[in-house]
Image: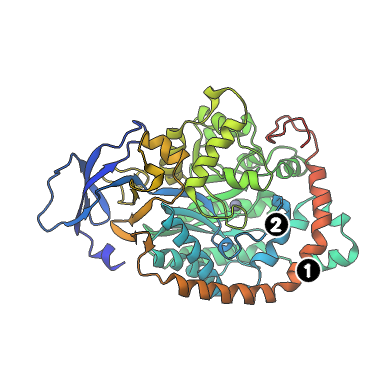
C-alpha cells in the first residue's frame, strides 16, 4: 500500500522476452514501469531514468498476469473434499463445507487461494464469497484484506440468496421424509432485506483502495432468489457502480427449473427483469442456447467460462465458439477449490482447449490458443470491470506481470510461446510475479509469507471446522442419496440442446 501511494518510483525490466499472444512470438523487449503502471514497452536498451530500479529478466518469458473470472475464496479450506459430486450434491454439502466459519477462517481461506493464484501466474480474480446466513461487513472486509495482504487484485462479491437449495428446486422438498424436511428448515437463510441492508453497508463503507480490491454484488443463482431480490441486487450494484455476477444455466437442472418456474430460460427471465448489461457476468453458462448467448451478447454482458469445474461437476461443455461468434465477451475462471480443486489458471487454459476439441471433430470450430489466452486476460479483465487497465503488456496498463523461467523443463525447447503457454505450462515455470509494479512472488516463493506457519494455521482451522460441522456433514450424508436420485431425474427432461459429452448415448 505504501508503495502504491509513494508511487512514482520507476522500474526498468531488461533482458526479458515479452509474449505477443496474437503473433505467437516473444521478442526481446524492455518494460519501463512508472509506479504501478507500464509507461513504455520497447526494444532492448529502452531509455530509463538513471535511478530506475533494475529488474534483470534474463531467461524470462514475460506474460500479462492471468485473470480468474470466477472463483470462491471460501472454497480454499475445502480442496479435495468431495469426489463424484454433481453441482447439486456440492450445494447439498455447502453447509458442511462452509458453515460455522469465524472471521479469521474467512480471511484464511481467501488468503490461501490468493497465494495459490499468485504462485500460479494469476494476478486478479472475481471472488464470489459466501457467509451463512447472510453477508457481514466484518466477513467481507476480512476477505478483501486477504487479497490486499497477498498483494493481489480482486473483485469481492458477497454471494446472496433468499431460498435454500431445497426451497429453490421445485418438488425436492416433497421427496424428503418429514424428519429431514424439518432438519433442512434450520438451514434457512436470512431474509432478503437483511442481506440487502448488509450489502448496502458494505458498498458504502468499502475500506480498501478500489484499484486493488473492489466490491460487487452476486445473487447466487436466479431461482435461489425472488425476482424482487434479483432486481434489488441489480439496482444496488448500479447505484454504486459495481459489478453484478450470478451463476447462469450452469447445470441442466438449472435450465429445466428455470423453464418450470419462469416459463422461459433464466437468461430470458433476467433480460425481462432488466438485469443484463455490460456490468453483468454470467458464471458458467453451459446450458445457454443460441438465443440466450445472443441475449447476453446484445447487452454487452460477459460469461465466466470455468471448463474444469463444468467437467468435474458433470455439467457438460459450454459452447464457447458460438459465444465468440456472437461477440459475447468470455473470461476464463477456475471456480472454487471445492469444485476444481485448485486455483491453477494454466490448467483452465488447457482444459478450455480440451473441452472445445472434445465437442466434435471439426477443428475449425476449436478454440485457438490465442483466443483462449485473450479470454483469460483481456476477456476476464472486462468481466471484472478492469477493462482497459488490466490484461495486456502495453503503455497505460497496470504492471501485472508474470515471469516464467525458460530454463524450466516446460520451456525446453521454446517453440511457439502462445501454444506452449496453453498446452504445456502448468505453473511449474512461474519464477516471479509482479502486481502493480511490486514483486509479490520472487524465486517461486510468495514474498514475506511463512508457508509452514500458514499450513499450521490452516490445519488448526480445518480440524476445528470439521468438528463443528459434524452435524451438517451427517445431514449431508442423509440427504445425498435423495438429492442424487431427484436431480438427475430432472436432468433427463428433454431439452433442445445437449452439452453432455456422451451426447445421446449413455455413459
Ligand atoms: Zn461458482
Where, quadrant-wise, is the C terminus in this rendering? top right
Percent coordinates x, y for residue 411 in the rendering: 37, 42
Q: Dot 2: what SS?
A: helix
- Mark 1 and mark 2 in contact? Answer it, CB < 8 Å: no
Q: Quadrant of residue 232?
A: bottom right
At x 9%, y 55%, the residue is: 50
Compared to residue 456, the image places residue 209 above or below, namely above
Q: Which residue is mark 1?
A: 474
Q: Which residue is mark 2?
A: 91
Q: Is residue 302 visible?
A: no
Q: Position of residue 424 (x, y in %)?
A: 45, 41
Count neighbours of disc 2 (C-alpha within 10 A) and say few if under 14, some if 14 to 19, many if 20 or more.
Answer: some
Asked if residue 246 lies left or right of residue 435, the reply is right
- Residue 208 is marked as none
Q: Residue at x 54, y 24 (%)?
A: 363
Q: Nearer the viewer, mark 1 or mark 2?
A: 1
Q: Please tell me whether mark 1 sits on a helix, a strand or a loop.
A: helix
Q: Residues within 10 Å of mark 1 (few under 14, many from 20)?
A: few
Q: Locate residue 74 relative to residue 414 in the image: left or right.
A: right
Q: Quadrant of residue 263?
A: top right
Is residue 183 or residue 372 the one in the foreground?
Answer: 372
**Earlier residue among tags 1 and 2:** 2
- The Cα atoms of the two marked residues, 1 and 2, are separated by 15 Å
Q: Which quadrant holds the N terminus? A: bottom left
Q: Is mark 2 within 8 Å of ligand 1?
A: no
Residue 6 at least partly seen: yes
Residue at image location 14% in from the left, 43% down from the top: 45
Residue 122 pos. (x, y %): 42, 52
Amino acid at each position: 500500500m505504501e508503495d502504491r501511494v509513494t508511487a512514482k518510483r520507476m522500474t526498468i525490466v531488461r533482458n526479458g522476452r515479452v509474449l505477443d499472444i496474437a503473433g505467437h512470438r516473444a521478442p526481446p523487449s524492455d518494460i519501463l514501469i512508472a509506479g504501478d503502471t507500464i509507461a513504455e514497452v520497447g526494444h532492448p536498451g529502452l531509455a530509463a531514468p538513471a535511478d530506475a530500479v533494475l529488474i534483470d529478466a534474463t531467461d524470462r518469458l514475460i506474460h500479462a498476469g492471468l485473470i480468474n473470472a470466477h472463483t470462491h475464496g471460501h472454497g480454499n479450506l475445502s480442496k479435495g473434499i468431495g469426489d463424484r459430486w454433481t453441482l447439486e450434491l456440492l450445494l447439498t454439502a455447502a453447509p458442511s463445507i462452509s458453515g460455522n466459519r469465524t472471521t479469521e477462517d474467512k480471511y484464511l481461506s481467501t488468503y490461501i487461494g490468493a497465494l495459490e493464484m499468485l504462485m500460479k501466474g494469476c494476478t486478479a480474480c472475481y471472488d464470489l464469497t459466501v457467509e451463512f446466513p447472510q453477508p457481514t461487513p466484518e466477513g467481507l472486509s476480512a476477505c478483501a484484506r486477504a487479497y490486499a495482504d497477498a498483494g493481489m487484485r480482486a473483485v469481492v462479491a458477497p454471494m446472496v440468496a433468499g431460498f435454500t437449495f431445497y426451497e429453490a428446486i421445485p418438488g425436492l422438498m416433497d421427496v424428503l421424509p418429514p424428519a429431514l424436511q424439518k432438519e433442512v428448515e434450520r438451514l434457512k437463510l436470512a431474509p432478503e432485506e437483511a442481506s440487502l441492508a448488509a450489502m448496502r453497508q458494505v458498498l458504502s463503507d468499502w475500506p480498501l483502495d478500489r484499484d486493488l480490491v473492489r466490491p460487487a454484488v452476486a445473487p447466487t443463482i436466479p431461482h435461489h432468489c425472488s425476482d424482487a431480490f434479483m432486481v434489488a441486487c441489480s439496482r444496488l450494484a448500479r447505484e454504486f457502480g459495481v459489478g453484478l455476477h450470478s451463476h447462469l444455466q450452469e447445470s441442466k437442472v438449472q435450465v429445466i427449473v428455470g423453464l418450470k418456474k419462469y416459463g422461459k430460460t433464466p437468461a430470458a427471465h433476467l433480460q425481462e427483469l432488466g438485469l443484463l448489461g455490460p456490468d453483468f457476468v454470467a458464471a458458467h453458462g453451459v446450458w445457454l442456447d443460441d438465443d440466450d448467448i445472443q441475449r447476453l451478447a446484445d447487452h454487452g454482458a460477459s460469461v465466466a467460462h470455468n471448463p474444469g469445474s463444468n467437467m468435474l461437476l458433470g455439467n457438460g461443455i459450454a459452447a464457447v465458439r458460438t459465444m465468440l461468434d456472437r461477440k459475447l465477451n468470455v473470461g476464463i475462471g477456475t471456480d472454487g477449490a471445492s469444485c476444481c480443486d485448485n486455483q491453477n489458471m494454466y490448467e483452465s487454459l488447457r482444459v478450455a482447449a480440451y473441452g472445445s476439441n472434445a465437442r466434435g471433430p471439426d477443428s475449425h470450430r476449436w478454440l485457438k490458443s490465442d483466443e483462449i489466452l485473450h479470454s483469460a486476460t483481456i476477456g476476464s479483465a472486462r468481466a471484472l470491470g478492469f477493462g482497459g487497465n488490466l490484461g495486456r503488456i502495453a503503455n497505460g496498463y497496470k504492471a501485472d506481470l508474470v515471469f516464467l523461467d525458460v530454463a524450466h523443463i516446460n520451456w525446453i525447447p521454446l517453440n511457439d510461446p502462445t501454444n506452449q503457454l496453453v498446452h504445456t505450462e502448468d505453473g511449474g515455470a512461474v519464477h516471479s510475479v509482479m502486481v502493480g509494479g511490486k514483486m509479490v512472488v520472487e524465486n517461486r516463493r510468495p514474498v514475506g509469507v511463512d508457508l509452514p506457519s500458514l499450513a499450521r494455521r490452516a490445519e488448526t482451522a480445518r480440524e476445528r471446522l470439521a468438528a463443528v460441522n459434524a452435524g451438517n456433514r451427517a445431514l449431508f450424508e442423509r440427504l445425498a442419496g435423495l438429492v442424487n436420485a431427484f436431480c438427475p431425474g430432472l436432468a433427463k427432461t428433454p431439452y433442445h440442446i445437449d452439452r453432455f459429452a456422451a451426447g445421446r448415448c449413455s455413459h
